[in-house]
Amino acid sequence: MQLSQYDTVYFLGIGGIGMSALARWFNKQGMFVAGYDRTPTPLTNELEKEGIKIHFDDDVALIPARVDNQKTLFVYTPAIPKDHKEYNYLKGKGYAILKRSEVLGLITKSHKTIAVAGTHGKTTTSSLITHILKVAGVNMVAFLGGVTTNYASNLISEGEANENTIVVAEADEFDRSFLKLFPDIAVITSVDPDHLDIYGNHQEVIKSFTDFTRQINKGGLLVKHESIRAIDNELDGVEVNTYGMSRGQFFASRITTEGGFFEFNLVGYASEIEKIKLGVPGFHNMENAIAATIVAKHLGVDDASIKKALGSYTGVKRRFEFIIKRDDLVYIDDYAHHPTEITAFLSSLRAMYPGKKITAVFQPHLYSRTRDFAEGFSKSLSIADEVLLMDIYPARELPIPGVSSDMLFDAITSTVKVRCTKNDVVQRVEDMDVEVIATIGAGDIDTCVGPLKELLESKYQKLA
């Protein structure tokens, strides 16, 4: 299949973070782009402003007339239900409908590709690589799993697309999507157990990541976190670099911090890269920055450009995103949805705001993940002084008997813990005195951010 045979692209689930980046890419190439999604969001609003046609009712009659032909590429997300009318209509017509990962594989096939994988950390690491390359003026395009605050987009490019364009792609392990990619450079940030509804057990997760490393092109590079011992450091025809906070071939030294923002030297090259300042807080982001630096250096980017980019990088929406930042009140929103991520996030808050009371508002994501990691969730959330625990966001799943947020609640050891819903969380926060508050989760908890910000700014407005 060649993408050049199409002049139109139609998306089922166009508002997804990965799908929307592809939609923007094809739109930028001058193709007619349209799609369906379940509900309008700020992201679909932006796509419509860019000239993409979107509707929100599952109705065959709403499919644009020019879409219904053999010159249309059809793309769908696995989140589309089996009884979806448009999906079944298009299947019935005999059209090939590809997953997002398959289309990304077609795009990257003819380009030098950097693929960033990991059960967590991949969005920030891929966006850090992207920002460094853009600052350095490298011809590139990046398909990201989050909206960068530097560029207000999940599709970033530098220069005109041609055969020399480097592609940065987030390599998603969900349903083994990343096995559609054959990168020249691969990064693996973590291989913690996750998506056990797909994989069954941790060993299958590791096997899938191992299979991914075998798809790196000969003469390529694998950059992996030093803690990932299950994946071999010896790959046939592929260089392997390891990194970490204090271990691995590349690590940080002379670390200093001010308000949670780090400065460090990077050890591992013939001469240290000195006084790297990060524009985002968090221990985990120092490691992500090291991985991004290794990739950039491998591509020939100079140290000055790397340091400039890391210092000016402002992050990804919903990844340690400051909503309110004042001396007397801090509100941060974060996408963390796995115990390891929550531990890293809340531990960083503790280091940044010693002596401050930390209030965490958490919405679990998926019944299966809540069931599989209940003990870990309770332990990680207990780092906070106060926890407001919302109901589970089901996403693609049907309820599992006996699985609810109550599984986590009893084992949370925080001084204050409250069960709440999306509908009453703002009222619950209004009744509390907060100093540092965080909303955490990968579901629709982001719809609470605006109302919570409005409440907090009103309640804690500074005296004139």
Image: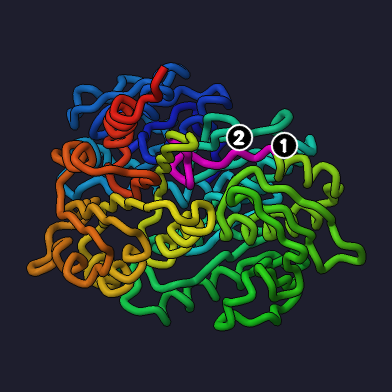
Check the image and report above or below for 372 versus 352.
below
- Residue 175 pos. (x, y %): 38, 62
179 with respect to 234 (left or right): left
Tell which residue pokes out farthest to the front in this image. 463
Residue 156 circle label = 2
- Residue 437 pos. (x, y %): 36, 45
Disc 2 secondary structure class: strand
Mark 2: which amino acid?
Ile
Verify whether residue 343 appears in magenta.
no
For the C terminus, give its image quadrant: top left
Tell which residue pokes out farthest to the right in this image. 270
Q: Which colour scheme is used?
A: rainbow
Highlighted range, magenta: 312-323
Provide the major secondary structure of the magenta segment.
Answer: loop
340 with respect to 296 (left or right): left
Disc 1 secondary structure class: helix
